[in-house]
Image: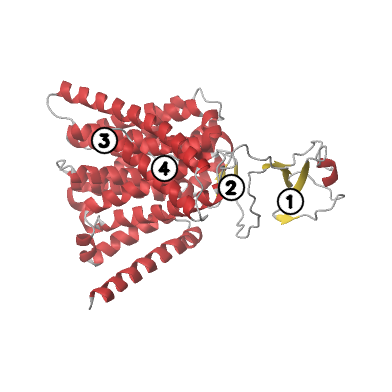
Amino acid sequence: MTNAESLGLTILVLSVVVMLAALSNRVSERLRVPAPFIFLVCSAAASDALPVLNRRVPVSLVEQVVTVALVVVLFDGGLGIGWRRFRGAVAPIVTLGVVGTVLTTGAVALLSHYVCDLGWRTSLVLGAALAPTDPAVVFSVLGRREVTGRTGTVLEGESGANDPVGISLMVALLGASGSIGQQAGHVVVTFVEQMTVGVAVGVGGGFALLWFMRKVSLPAAGLHPVRALAGAMAIYGVATVAHGSGFLAVLVAGVLIGDATMPYRLEIRQVFGALSSLAEIVVFIALGLTVGLRTLADGWAWLIGLVLAVLLAVVVRPLLVGPLLLPVRMRAGERGFVLWAGLKGAVPILLGAFAITSGVPDAQRIYEIIFMVVAFSVLVQGGSVGWAARKLGVPMRTTPSTPWTFGVRLPHEPSSTLHVIEAGSDADGATLEDLVINGDMWVSAALRGGHLLPMAPDTVVRAGDEVLLLRQPAEPDDAQDPPRD
């Protein structure tokens, strides 16, 4: 087989795998099994059936792939949260993301040592690896159901915030040496440095990238998402080189940019959403290929993983993270849902790879334990998220599939507002003509149940209808300003 044929075969196999992974979401809906669990088990079974796959996918490669994937996922998560939503829930997000992660790390380390009889070094590494949760997995298992209100914001924000914290703790632990006191001091100093530099670079990089996207025009619309992706990667690189948390910097930058006005904002969000979905698929397939199902029995990794997974879900998180939610204005059912929906995913995989590439003793066993915890979390907790939301009275709405869109391009940014007509309001029962104010605003579109309403002056809007109002765009002060959506 020639090199060209070998490359062609590799591309063919990879494309088929990705297409099947994309279709697995339909299978997961029928079987009521989360799609990430299917990726994990199928790729692990493939590595057992074809050992050559395991040999060709070293853990060091997984570490690099997951790092890039996580940068995309965290930046997309930050864009989805935005500054307005984050500001409204900043206290619980920061408390859960920092304090909750540190407490969980300590609790898992104690349980690993005293319950599972593991050494202190192994226990601490496991604690740091298993503390973070994963927003991509949470909303993957929810499918087309969206958690509304403060609960969704807290879940997304906590998962995004505790990822960089867990990674920083792991980096500090792996670099510690000397006496116990020296190691503890190193961990504290390194952790504070990682957090401080990460926030500073994230804020500075976020504002710089936003300014760049607003002020510097590009010749093609397709280049704008590429520039945003390159900017996110650059922010990660700068923070990492400066000995900070690149992941935290990317998340902070995404939050600052998320709901800001910028050209081609919709296209950027769409591209990052697609890349984030692809990153999730790649991460779980990569983990499965580096763990053989037959080797899980060695050293009782499967049993230790199951014990830690159960204790994390029903003991550690409710007892340690639960009290941190008490000051938050949430119903008891919403607090319970946040505690149950703290799923494990890509970050524990990355941290397990860190342990192996850093030469930590018993690292392969740690990696296999993490596999079991992630598999349990995705299958058991993830599979019951919808049921838990119904039982706990958490408001959720099903987002309908809307594959078609329409729009126009304008040279300058219009002033637009999307209104959802509320029951009992002055607009409920009004005509489209009644909604126009002083002649400087007009109705661009009106929808009811996903269908367009006639654009006639006497068309009556009702509660639940969506109305897009536009104002005449103002002329820009600077002729160099780029065109915006």
- The amino acid sitting under disc 1 is Ala
Tag nearer the camera, 2 or 3: 2
Residue at 16% in and 41% down: 360
Residue at 17% in and 35% down: 119
Which residue carries the number 3 mark? Answer: 170
Nearest to the observer: residue 333 or residue 371: 371
Residue at 21% in and 52% down: 297
**Residues marked 3 and 4 touching at CB (< 8 Å):** no
Which residue carries the number 1 mark? Answer: 445
The residues bearing labels 1 and 4 have C-alpha atoms spaced at a distance of 33 Å
Q: Earlier in the sequence, mark 1 or mark 4?
A: 4
- Please tell me whether mark 1 sits on a helix, a strand or a loop: strand
Which residue carries the number 2 mark? Answer: 483
Residue 52 x %, y %: 21, 65
Which image quadrant for residue 102? top left
The reply to whether residue 464 is in sight is yes
Q: Earlier in the sequence, mark 2 or mark 3?
A: 3
The disc placed on residue 196 is none
The residues bearing labels 1 and 2 have C-alpha atoms spaced at a distance of 22 Å
**Residues marked 1 and 4 touching at CB (< 8 Å):** no
**Residues marked 1 and 2 touching at CB (< 8 Å):** no
- The amino acid sitting under disc 2 is Pro
Tag nearer the camera, 1 or 4: 1
Which residue carries the number 4 mark? Answer: 74
Residue 225 x %, y %: 47, 51
The residues bearing labels 2 and 4 have C-alpha atoms spaced at a distance of 28 Å
Tag nearer the camera, 3 or 4: 4
Residue 478 is left or right of residue 98, and the answer is: right
- Please tell me whether mark 3 sits on a helix, a strand or a loop: helix
**Residues marked 2 and 3 touching at CB (< 8 Å):** no
How many residues crowd around disc 3 within 10 Å: few (fewer than 14), some, or many (20 or more)?
many
